Amino acid sequence: MTTDIINIKWLLNTRTNNELLRGTALAQLPVIENAWLRIEDGIIADYGEMSAYQGSLSRQAQKKNLDTIDATGQFILPAWCDSHTHLVFAASREEEFVDKIKGLSYADIAAKGGGILNSANKLNAATEDELFNLAWKRLEEVSKLGTGAIEIKSGYGLTVEGELKMLRVIKKLKEKSALSIKSTFLGAHTYPTAFKENHQGYIDQIINEMLPVIAREKLADYIDVFCENGFFSAAETETICKAGMGYGLKPKIHANQLNLSGGTQIGVKLGAISVDHLETMDEDAIKSLAGSATIGTLLPTAAFFLRMPFQPARTLIDSGCAIALASDYNPGSSPSGNMNLVIAMSCIQMKMLPEEAINAATINGAYAMELQDEVGSISIGKQANLIFTKPISSIAYLPYAFGSNCIDKVMIKGEFL
Ligand code: NIG
Ligand code: FE
């Protein structure tokens, strides 16, 4: 089956070779004006300028089943790659949202048994089917908002049974969804109440009871730890990540969100795929990240929702760190998986250029899930995961019109949603 999309006003992020973008390269967004794109069996087969389309068509003439889509006035870009979410959860937490309006902090809420523990209680009471159905609806919602590849974490189980249940839900989502999904084991999200005074006991449970089953059933691609004061120390993070790495799980770490936790440096030392959050960075953490292959994943909607200072994106980019943007979709700190909003916020509040934001949310996001050979750019051989915009005037209009839905249609693996 061949589909040609013709008369594309601007085809964005066309790349002939893959490269993790950092420094000034992040602002380079290749475009073809007045373009065409060919899809064969869900894969990008060719593309170019409309002036060369007739020639390509004559080479194609013998083929039957050629479908043509006219995209006059539309921009087409690769679907978003959201490399950090907690999309499987049992219930929303708007009562805590109101507590925060009344003055409680994220840490206050966690200390009184709310926050992650609140979500864990609800998750442990839910069945696998209930969790799957809720997560499926969220996946449908974010895919219509342009997300084509997504990472999903466990971390609301905090018991052997609960963590495995979450990971099995993610496995089922992987099997049933057209989206590319990566799964991360975040058993070390917080200490469950039963182990409040016995941290080593819970770490032993993660290492001796959870990880062997996860490895045996191939339930995760990555290991994550919430490295934070009052949660897991840098030393505990290292121990847990190393145990995961023993089973082939590479680290993607929650680092430097509320405090200078040392998570960035530990992540870099362990060769983590990414260190995520980074609201609270000092010179040492920035230097360590800049000199590494580890990606700094910025989650501006979490900073926004928690009323925290935004991540220092400009300093990170200008220092040479490779950064990605992600939604952190979760019920406590970012109850939104809308990547369009993430991009707008990164431009409005973190002074990223629209081109930088799009690259950080596509090709660099793909790298943060090791999916760079499949998604994240308009490249021959990659999946036809495409966002068709409504008629808009420029790339900058996307983050500028932050409250408008600029998406007309989304295509995943060559099929419109
Ligand atoms: O990435 N910071 C740790 N974990 C999540 C929030 C979890 C929650 O509050 O439920 C985050 O922000
Ligand atoms: Fe998170």
Image (cartoon, grey):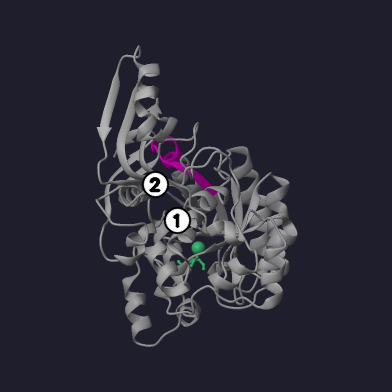
Q: Amino acid at mark 2?
A: Leu
Start-end of magenta stretch: 172-183
Question: Which residue appears at 65% of the width and 69% of the height?
Answer: 319
In the figure, is residue 9 to the left or right of 128? left
Say what amino acid the circle numbered 1 marks: Ile
Apparent side of residue 254 relative to residue 414 in the rendered image (left or right): right
Look at 57% across and 49% down and name the residue there.
Answer: 367
Tell which residue pokes out farthest to the front in this image.
Answer: 51
Residue position marked by numbered label 1 in the rendering:
358
Q: Residue at x 35, y 34 (%)?
A: 50
Closer to us: 72 or 26: 72
In this rendering, the answer to whether 306 lies above or below 184 is: below
Residue 178 among magenta residues: yes
Q: Is residue 79 above or below residue 106?
A: above
Q: Is residue 20 left or right of residue 344?
A: right
The verdict on residue 406 being magenta is: no
Q: Is residue 224 above or below residue 284?
A: above
Across and down, in percent, residue 404 comes to: 25, 62
* Upstream in sequence: badge 2 or badge 1: 2
Judge from the rendering whether residue 257 lies leftward or rightward of residue 86; answer left or right. Answer: right
Query: Element at badge 1?
Result: helix
Q: Which residue is mark 2?
A: 77
